[in-house]
Image (tube, rainbow, N blue to C red):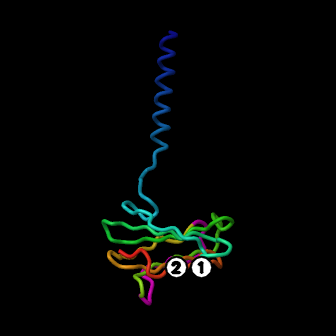
Amino acid sequence: MRTRSKIATLASAALVSTWLVAGAAPASAAGPCGGGYSRVGVYAIPASGARTGTLEVYYSASSGKNCALTYGYGSYAGRVNQKQVGISLSGRSAWAGVDNGRFAHYAGPVYVRARGKCIDLRGQVATGVRHLNGVHCG
């Protein structure tokens, strides 16, 4: 009887530990822009002074697309406030993708097909703004 009890306890422990390990694994290895994107740039918002956010840029070699997101930083992270991200081919008069609003965590993702071309970016969190022109060429 004692042996059966130990076996049942060990089997239960193995089942629970297997469930915990399987449950802890992420459902997908995709990043914030989706599968196949690699982060190619991280920029403080604004470029100088009190930081309010972070602008992140990703690239997918398979699709030739860039992706951007804007996150709050410090007291702006996780709180509803103005967040905006914009992305376009360099020199264009209109943004290819914009996400603008009052968000708790981030604005974006926004995308532009830019294989072999430079991009322009804009990130804003609260009153902090960051512009990047003619970056991530290629």
Q: Position of residue 71 (x, y in %)?
A: 57, 68
How far across and down, in percent of the image, does residue 123 sit? 55, 76
| Mark earlier in primary sequence (2, 1) | 2
Q: Residues within 10 Å of mark 1 (few under 14, many from 20)?
A: many
- Asked where in the image residue 94 lies, by quadrant, the reply is bottom left
The secondary element bearing badge 2 is classed as: strand
Disc 1 on helix, strand or loop? strand
Q: Image quadrant for the C terminus?
A: bottom left
Residue at the spot x=51%, y=16% of the render? 6
In the picture shown, does residue 89 fall above or below 38? below
Q: Amino acid at mark 1?
A: Val
Q: What residue type is disc 2 on?
A: Arg
Residue 90, located in which quarter of the rendered image? bottom left
Is residue 70 shown left or right of residue 110? right
With 54 as the anchor, is 134 left or right in this view? Answer: left
Name the residue at the top extreme.
1
Crowding around mark 2 (Cα neighbors within 10 Å: few <14, some 14 to 19, many 20+) is many
Q: Which residue is mark 2?
A: 122
The answer to whether residue 8 is above or below residue 30 is: above
Question: Mark 1 and mark 2 in contact (Cβ < 8 Å)?
Answer: yes
Relative to 110, 36 lies left or right = left
Q: Which residue is mark 1?
A: 129
Camera-nearest residue between 108 and 51: 51
Name of the residue lying farthest toward the left: 62
Q: How many marks?
A: 2
Work out whether residue 51 or residue 108 is closer to the camera in this orientation and state it.
51
Q: Is residue 100 magenta?
A: yes
Magenta residues span 92-105
Q: Which mark is residue 21?
A: none
Residue 50, given in percent of the width and then of the height, sits at 68, 73
Q: CA distance from mark 2 to mark 1?
A: 7 Å
